Image (cartoon, rainbow, N blue to C red):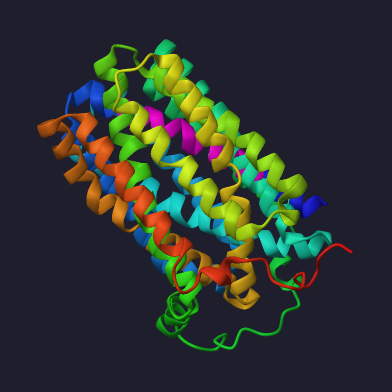
Amino acid sequence: MRPVTGLVLAQACAYLGTRLAMIAIPWFVLESTGSPAHMGLVTLFELGSYTLARLFVGPVLDRWGQRAVSVRVDVLGAVALVSVPVLFTAGLLPFPVLLALVTVIGLATGPSEAAKVSLSPFAARAAGVRVERVTGLTGTVDRLSMTVGPLVAGVVVTSLGALTALYLNAALMLLAALVMTVFLRRDIEATAGDGPDPEADQGYLTRLHAGWRAVWGDLPLRTLTVMILVTNVVDVAVMSLALPVWAHEGGWGPEAIGLVAGTLGGASVLGSLCAVAIGHRLPRRAVFFTALAVAGPPRILVLALDVPLLVVLVVWGVSGLFGGLINPILSAMLFERLPLPMVGRGMAMLGALTRVGAPIAAPGVGVAIGLWGVAPVLVAGAVVYLSAVVWPAFGPSAEAFARPAEEPVGADP
C-alpha cells in the first residue's frame, strides 16, 4: 500500500494548498482593488494558464512520467506562490506582475493535478488493489481538503491576512513534492504492464493528437467532457466570484466563505467515504446523475435568496454529501475507458477541455455581477448547471455510464 499512501498524502498536501489559494487570492484582489472585474481578470489568467498547461502536458506526462512531472511543477508553483507576498511586502507587486505570477501558478497547478490524478491506476496496480478503492480515497482527500482548506483559509485570512495563507500554500506544495519523491518509485508507471505505448516513438504533436482522439473520439467521454465543462464554468463563477461578493455584501467577511465552503467539504467527505465503502455496489448511472443534480443547483440558488446563514449552511451540507459521491464514480469511469498507455494524455486532455470555459467566462461573470448584482447571476447559473446534467443522463450515451459487467484487471478478488 506504500504507493497508494504516498499518492494520497501528496494529493492531500496539494489539494489543501489549492483550497487556501481559492479564498486567499480572490479576497486579496477584492480587498486591494475593490473590483469584481479585477477578480474575474485574475481568474482568467490563473485558470487560463492552468487549462493551457493541462491541454499540452499530456505527452510530457506519458514520456517523462507522472511522478517526475508532479515533483518539478510543485516546486515551481511554490516559488511563484511565495513571490506574491514577498513582492507585495516590498511594494513591487503592481497588478500586471500579480497577473504574471498567477499565470505561473496556473501553469504549475495544471500539470501537478493532472499528474497526480493519472497516477491512480498505476498506484492501484502497484499495490494490488481495485482502482475504485484508490479513486475513492483520493476523492475523499479532495473533499476533506474542501473542509479543512476553506476553514483554515478563513481563519488565516481573517487573523493574519491573505498573504500569510499563500506562504502556507507554498509550504504545502513543497511538502507534496517531498512525499511524492519518498513514497513512489521512480518507475511506478512501468508497473502497469498493459502493453507498449503505440505512439512511443512518435513526435510530440502526434502523441498530443492521440490524447485528443482518446477523449473526443469516444462518445461517452465526449459527453462527460461537455457536461463537466459547463458545470465547471458555473462552479468557478460561484466559488471564485459570486461567493466572495455574497460574503462581502452580507458583511460577514472571509470567515463566512470558509465556513460555507468548509460545510460543503465536510459533508462531501462523508459522501466520499460512502463511495469508498459501498460505491462499487451502488447503481452507478442513477447515483452519479442524481448526485450531480443535488450537488449543484440547490447550493447555488440558496445564495440568491435572503435567508439566514444557517439555512445556507444546511443546503450546502446536503449538496456536499451528494457531491462526495461524484468524483470517485467519475474517475473510475474515465480510467475504464482510457487505455493505460494513454492515461496521462487522456486525463490531461480531459482536464483541460473541461476547464477551458471557466477562464473565458470569468471576466464576463465578474462584469455581470457588477452590473446586475450577484442574485440574477446565481439564478442563471443554477439553471445552466441543471440543464447540463439532465442532457447526458437521458442522452444516447447514457447506458455507457453503467458499471461494466466485469471488474477491471487488477481488481481485488
Q: Name the spot of residue 377 as percent of width and height, x first.
A: 22, 37
The magenta region covers 9-27
Q: Quadrant of the C terminus?
A: bottom right
Q: Name the spot of residue 214 as percent of width and height, x first.
A: 50, 78
Q: Quadrant of residue 301?
A: top left
Q: Residue furthest left?
A: 371
Q: Quadrant of residue 225?
A: bottom left
Q: Is residue 114 left or right of residue 301?
A: right
Residue plotted at (62% across, 46% down) = 139
Residue plotted at (56% across, 74% down) = 63
Q: Residue furthest right?
A: 413
Q: Is residue 78 left or right of residue 23?
A: right
Is residue 163 placed above or below 357 in the rendered structure? Answer: above
Q: Nearer the viewer, residue 413 or 84?
A: 413
Q: Nearer the viewer, residue 326 or 23?
A: 326
Is residue 197 placed above or below 153 in the rendered structure? Answer: below
Q: Main secondary structure of the magenta part?
A: helix
For the question of whether residue 282 can be seen, the reply is yes
Q: Name the spot of residue 51 as percent of width and height, x first.
A: 36, 57
Q: Is residue 350 left or right of residue 332?
A: left
Residue plotted at (61% across, 34% down) = 144
For the question of whether residue 170 can be seen, the reply is no
Q: Name the spot of residue 141 as percent of width and height, x first.
A: 63, 40
Query: How many numbered callouts?
Result: 0
Q: Nearer the viewer, residue 115 or 255?
A: 255
Q: Is 21 one of the magenta-colored residues?
A: yes
Q: Is 1 one of the magenta-colored residues?
A: no
Residue plotted at (51% across, 71% down) = 345
Q: Is residue 409 left or right of residue 320?
A: right
Q: Residue furthest front?
A: 394
